[in-house]
Amino acid sequence: MGTTTPDQVRAVAAAAVTSAGLVLEDVTVTPAGRRRVLRVVVDLPDDVLGGVPVESVESAARAVSEALDSSDVMGATPYVLEVTSPGVDRPLTERRHWLRARGRLVTVTLADGGTVAGRLTEAGDDGVTVDGRPLGWDDLRKGRVEVEFNRPDEPAGADDDLVDDETDDTDDTDDEDGEEA
């Protein structure tokens, strides 16, 4: 087979990814010396909140690998398969991205050049709602989830029990050689 295109790989990988309960987000084929890197990005279905579980990515990777092995879409040139999920910095470009980001802090660039930042509370047929402000799909240029270290749905101090206040790394009874004085 000649040059492999992402569309050809997408056709083979799509059913495999779906069988793992995920959505095929993107496919890229990049030359890397004598090999190629085939990167398959998978995501959760439309209305599922949260991140893609590692187990689901592993399942999708096995399914895609098996599907590619049983086809000739990659030809005879060696390749490295990478199956991954989109990172938090992925732009919100499709309706399902917005649906999955409900409850998250977002920054939205509007079609008129303005920006809106706040909590994404709704995403539906007519558009999204950010901090009570409805925005139609035509009003949106792009959006991005903002990283939060203390989300409002987490109790304050949830990580406090990771710190052991009783631990004291100093021991006045040891000399420089670590022997007791």
Image (cartoon, rainbow, N blue to C red):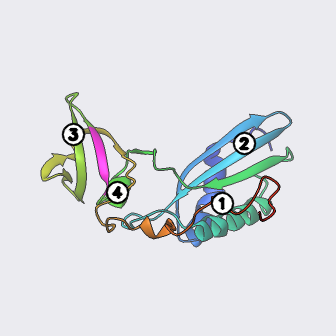
What is the C-alpha distance between the residues marked 2 and 1? Answer: 67 Å
Q: In this image, 84 relative to 75: left or right? A: left
Which residue is at 34% across, 67% downward? 154
Q: Which residue is mark 2?
A: 4
Q: Nearer the viewer, mark 3 or mark 2?
A: 3
Query: Which residue in the structure is indicated by mark 4?
Result: 101
Mark 4 to mark 1: distance in Å?
Answer: 52 Å
- The quarter holding residue 68 reads bottom right
The span from disc 4 to disc 3 (Cα, nearest Å) is 15 Å
Q: Which residues are magenta?
A: 104-108
Between disc 2 and disc 1, whose residue precedes? Answer: 2
Indicate the amino acid at tag 2: Thr
Q: State which quarter of the image contains the N terminus.
A: top right
Q: Amino acid at mark 3?
A: Val
x and y, in percent, of residue 97 in the image: 38, 54
Q: Closer to the camera, 180 or 149?
A: 180
For the point 55% across and 67% down, the residue is: 53
Could you tell me the amino acid type at mark 1?
A: Asp
